[in-house]
Amino acid sequence: MCSIRGRRKNCWMRFVRVDEGAAGLNPRRRRGRLKAMAQSGSAKMLKVVCAAGVLMGLPRLIAQQVDAATLIQRIDAANQARYDNVTGFADTEHYSVFRGNDTHPAAEMVVRVTYRKGEGKSYEVRSRSGSGLIQKLALDPLLRNEKEINEPGRVQASWFTSANYEMRPHPEQARQVNGRGCVVVDITPKHKAPNMIEGTLCVDPRDGTLVEMDGVASKSPNPLAGTTHMMRQYRNIEGYAMATHARAESDSAIVGRTVVVVDYSEYELKSRTPSNRDASAAPGKPPPR
């Protein structure tokens, strides 16, 4: 080992011996090469650290450019633009139900969903597997509920807007969700319902589009059901915020713990104003939930 009080020359020479590429160099050139390598490594490390700092600070920098009132206006505008411009979409949704602490789903269902403005949603079940009882008591009612809340004249009541929710933005609270920068907005529904959430949104401050929703249902669907915790994540597709992953967990004394996971894929989007903008940077117009 090189002593702290030892001569610097001896330390450099001992480290040089592990550099096989310097074996043919004279001592002076060996020392020069090792110093250059050390300096190069330090420079690379500095670049990595600086880049990480920029990426971590980017959401906060973006958040500081918008105040709470402006952010709420952008959330409302994004919802209205969605309603005005999205004429329809289709996607494939994979539902998995887990019971207790099981890691293997007790029931699964794959559905092709079609939304048409003015008509609502329709569902084509592509496949089913697992418990028929869970299919009947959990998945089928879930599809019926989704169809009902997306009926014309009702869908607006479930939007994440200031008309339906008390919103308390926190522009100083920036997060990264799946690589996207967003800021936190606390939400409290103005009326309680099983599909109205009390919790938080994470919103892109540039355009008010959703990145993530997380919270609990403000009202249980029935007296026997426990509290339901829900989470849904979104990404921009052709400039519109589309759901990509959702999770709902409930726990009751009668049926125990149940987790429903939904993965969304194979989107086909139709809009009144087709967009060729970059999906990650363009202002978004999220479609119906």
Image (cartoon, grey):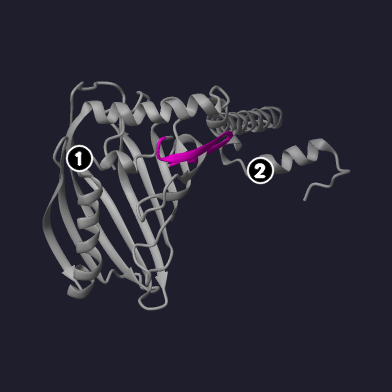
Camera-nearest label, 2 or 1: 1
Observer-nearest residue: 184 or 244?
A: 184
Q: Position of residue 151 (x, y in %)?
A: 20, 44
Observer-nearest residue: 69 or 101?
A: 69
Label count reads 2
Determine whether 149 is above or below 104 in the image.
above
From the image, tell me which residue sits under label 2.
17
* Residue type, label 1: Pro
Query: Can residue 11 be seen at all in this image of the molecule?
Result: yes
Q: Residue at x 42, y 77 (%)?
A: 253
From the image, tell me which residue sits under label 1.
152
Residue numbers of the magenta segment: 163-177
* SS at badge 2: loop
Mark 1, residues whose alpha carbon is within 10 Å: few (<14), some, or many (≥20)?
some
* SS at badge 1: loop
Q: Position of residue 65 (x, y in %)?
A: 55, 22
Q: Position of residue 68 (x, y in %)?
A: 54, 29
Q: In the displayed structure, does residue 30 sit left or right of residue 95?
A: right
Q: Is residue 172 magenta?
A: yes
Mark 2, residues whose alpha carbon is within 10 Å: few (<14), some, or many (≥20)?
few
Query: Residue 137: which quarter of the image?
Result: bottom left
Query: Can residue 280 be seen at all in this image of the molecule?
Result: no
